[in-house]
Amino acid sequence: MNKVFDIPLNRENTWSTKWDLYKGKDIIPLWVADMDFQSPDFVQKAFQKRIDHGIYGYTEIPDELYSEVIKAYRKSSWTIEKEWIVFLPGLETVIHQIYNFIDKSHSVFVPRPIYPPFLNAAKHSNKKIIYLDLKNDNGRLIYDFEKFNTCATKNGWLMFTNPHNPGGTVFNQKELTELANIIIDNDMYVLSDEIHSDFILESQDTHIHLAKISGMSDRVITIDSLSKTFNIAGLNCAYAVIPNQKIRKEFKKLLKGQTPSPSLFGIIATLACFKEGDSWKAELIEYLNKNRSFLLNEFSNRDDIEIINPKGTYLLWFKVINSEGVDLKKHFEDYGVGLSNGAEFGNAGWMRLNFGTNIDLLKKAASRIHKALDALVL
């Protein structure tokens, strides 16, 4: 295993969103989905080559990057075409812009819990929002298909994440087919956030693109990026895959003049990661599995929390039982750990922990979490 993942990095004075939130405080930040691992050497080398050139002007997307995206999707058994790809600075922009794309008479279905920008965008929209509460099926968050089928409406849009953020569910073929049947029967569409698709932690699981399910290709806008996988979120490069020509044309029209292109260094890093990243990614997944196993073993005997076992992502979602009236975010901070508040994902009483950090720091944080939980039952 690559020892780089064990190296503790000092991120002070680097303008880190994750670490600067608790600047000057003895609080371990395990909140935002930003890993504490140095990006691969091949990214640094690609940067150095451009730095040596010394010009950073306006930049076009190179054909080579389109080819690498197509090649990557072919590896996951989906053959896409160049014209389907629309490059973006990031996914959050699209999550907000999609509401300007959707007709005002159409409903938007938003699962809970879900990545907070989906909820924030819904809150500021004039569309009819219908929330779908996911259910816990033996430590796995899944859709209640019967309820969804009952409330599904013609021409509605579903906001979807796979793997699920924050729960880490990797939806299987049967589940995706059942979801697709509801979408097709009601003539609906989907915005599918698949940014965590590289983080499949167990060999028996496979990430399947929703758009690849029979009858779904023209109904899905897939959004993706390598920013999570290679820890390059600050570089701003992402893309959408939109097979439906009409939707793609309208989508590009919506973005024009409002949404910037990916950054030069985002393009450089993404291209390098596509071309050279497979080995580094495999070692990362191995390390994250070690961290996940540690956390599951560490907290499995506690009866005051309910844990969702993440099969994808590097995020642990857990419920603190009997915590009504407690400001959980502040409580954990008081014991020296910064976690994401479940209320921001639509589920108060839950917390999200980012285990994409070195194991020694994670062990230190785990000790503090135990003390914080113990204090709630005293």
Image (cartoon, grey):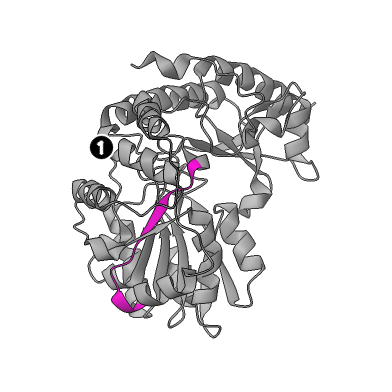
Indicate the position of residue 47 as horizontal and vertical percent values: 40, 32
Task: Work out whether residue 262 or residue 142 is closer to the camera in this orientation and state it.
Answer: 262
Residue 347: give x, y in percent of width and height. 64, 52
Instruction: Tell me residue 314's x, y (percent).
Output: 47, 35
**Residue 24 appears left or right of 122:** right
Residue 341 falls in image quadrant = top right
| Above/below status of 20 relative to 246 | above
Q: Residue 301: horizontal and vertical position, in percent?
A: 56, 24
Q: Is residue 242 magenta?
A: yes
At 20% from the left edge and 48% from the top edge, which residue is drawn?
Answer: 71
Q: Residue furthest bottom?
A: 105
Q: Is residue 33 left or right of residue 370?
A: left
Image: 270 above or below 62: above
Q: Which residues are magenta?
A: 235-246
Q: At numbered mark 1, what does the secondary structure look like: helix, strand or loop?
A: helix
Q: In which quadrant is the C terminus drawn?
A: top right
- In the image, what residue occupies the spot 46% across and 68% down? 158
Residue 247 drawn above or below residue 213: below
The answer to which of 60 and 8 lies nearer the viewer is: 60
Which residue lies at the image location 53% right of the left edge and 65% below the top edge? 110
- In which quadrant is the N terminus drawn? top left
> Is residue 81 at all visible to an observer of this figure?
yes
83 left or right of 330 in image: left
Q: Amino acid at mark 1?
A: Lys
Circle 1 is placed at which residue position?
275
